[in-house]
């Protein structure tokens, strides 16, 4: 695990993911698919990916990408326990994402200089994150909890906070989120659906990624 300056690393993360504007949320049944998937996303212009601990293959998948695809910034998602957090970092995860807020996970990542993005849906959870010095939270599940309108409302009391909305974000609505100044990037599984991964249809994943990144780039131009 790389222990570098925690505040620098955490504070730069929103800017880093804003360059591409999208963080795919990946669930892999087979760790062997991790490297071809990472290469397919990269070929489509996406250089961040969140491999979730929703499957047993997560740790090995993170290790495979970390060793074999150095241009991909691989992180761990759905990190619910300290055990998963430590395992993710030991296998090369460069950032940690969670569906909810856990102070022990946030503190551990801060101590080890690892960007951490806890999931929040309420002002109370966000307040805890801000009090711990975080500059970004995952707004999850974004669509169910009010989507763009909810983020606008939350932006008022937390004007310096960046959001990573995920959950129900897709090609049809990503631009509505990305036009908010407080949204650094969107997360989601639509560029890497499980069936395409399992069927080895990586060219289609590249095409979905390219479609998303081209539109984001055109919007930023
Ligand atoms: C997440 O954990 O970020 C979500 O499960 C992704 O949601 P999606 O599958 O609706 O994109």
Image (cartoon, rainbow, N blue to C red):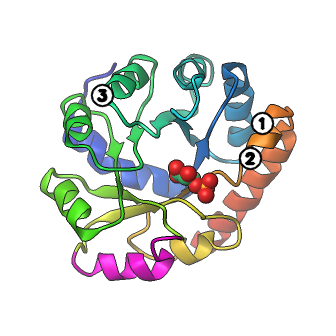
Residue drawn where x is 46% and y is 40% of the image:
78
- The earlier-in-sequence mark between 1 and 3 is 3
Give percent across and percent down for residue 33: 73, 25
Residue drawn where x is 70% and y is 41% of the image:
41
Circles 1, 2 touching at the beta carbon (< 8 Å):
yes
**163 to the left or right of 109:** right
* Residue 153 visible, this orientation: yes
- Say what secondary structure mark 2 lies in: loop
Dot 2 corresponds to which residue?
A: 193
Q: Quadrant of the N terminus?
A: top left
Other-residue count near label 2 (Cα within 10 Å), few / some / many at <14 / 14–19 / ≥20? some
Residue 151 magenta-highlighted: yes
Residue 131 against residue 10 in the figure, above or below: below
Residue 64 falls in image quadrant: top right
Other-residue count near label 1 (Cα within 10 Å), few / some / many at <14 / 14–19 / ≥20? many
Ligand 1 within 8 Å of the CB at mark 1: no
Ligand 1 within 8 Å of the CB at mark 3: no
**64 to the left or right of 42:** left
Residue 62 falls in image quadrant: top right
What span is colored magenta in the figure?
A: 144-157
Dot 3 corresponds to which residue?
A: 82
Q: Nearer the viewer, residue 212 or 121?
A: 121
Dot 1 corresponds to which residue?
A: 197
Residue 148 against residue 76 in the figure, above or below: below
* Residue 188 visible, this orientation: no
- The earlier-in-sequence mark between 3 and 2 is 3
Q: Nearer the viewer, residue 34 or 215?
A: 34
Residue drawn where x is 68% and y is 28% of the image:
29
Give the distance between the C-alpha atoms of the residues marked 1 and 3, in whole angstroms: 28 Å
- Say what secondary structure mark 3 lies in: helix
């Amino acid at each position: 695990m790389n222990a570098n300056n925690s505040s620098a690393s955490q504070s730069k993360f929103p800017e880093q993911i804003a360059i591409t504007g999208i963080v795919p949320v990946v669930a892999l049944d087979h760790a062997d698919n991790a490297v071809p998937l990472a290469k397919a996303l990269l070929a489509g212009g996406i250089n961040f990916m969140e491999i979730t601990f929703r499957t047993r293959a997560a740790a090995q998948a993170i290790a495979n990408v970390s060793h074999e695809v150095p241009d991909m910034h691989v992180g761990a998602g759905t990190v619910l326990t300290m055990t998963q957090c430590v395992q993710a970092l030991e296998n090369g995860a460069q950032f940690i994402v969670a569906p909810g807020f856990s102070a022990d996970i946030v503190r551990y990542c801060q101590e080890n200089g690892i960007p951490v993005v806890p999931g929040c849906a309420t002002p109370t959870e966000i307040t805890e994150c801000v009090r711990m010095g975080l500059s970004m939270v995952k707004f999850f599940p974004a669509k169910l909890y009010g989507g763009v309108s909810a983020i606008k409302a939350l932006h008022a009391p937390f004007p310096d906070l960046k959001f990573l909305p995920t959950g129900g974000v897709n090609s049809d609505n990503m631009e509505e989120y990305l036009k908010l100044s407080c949204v650094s990037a969107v997360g989601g599984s639509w560029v890497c659906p499980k069936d395409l991964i399992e069927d080895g249809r990586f060219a289609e994943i590249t095409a979905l990624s390219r479609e998303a990144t081209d539109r984001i780039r055109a919007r930023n131009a």
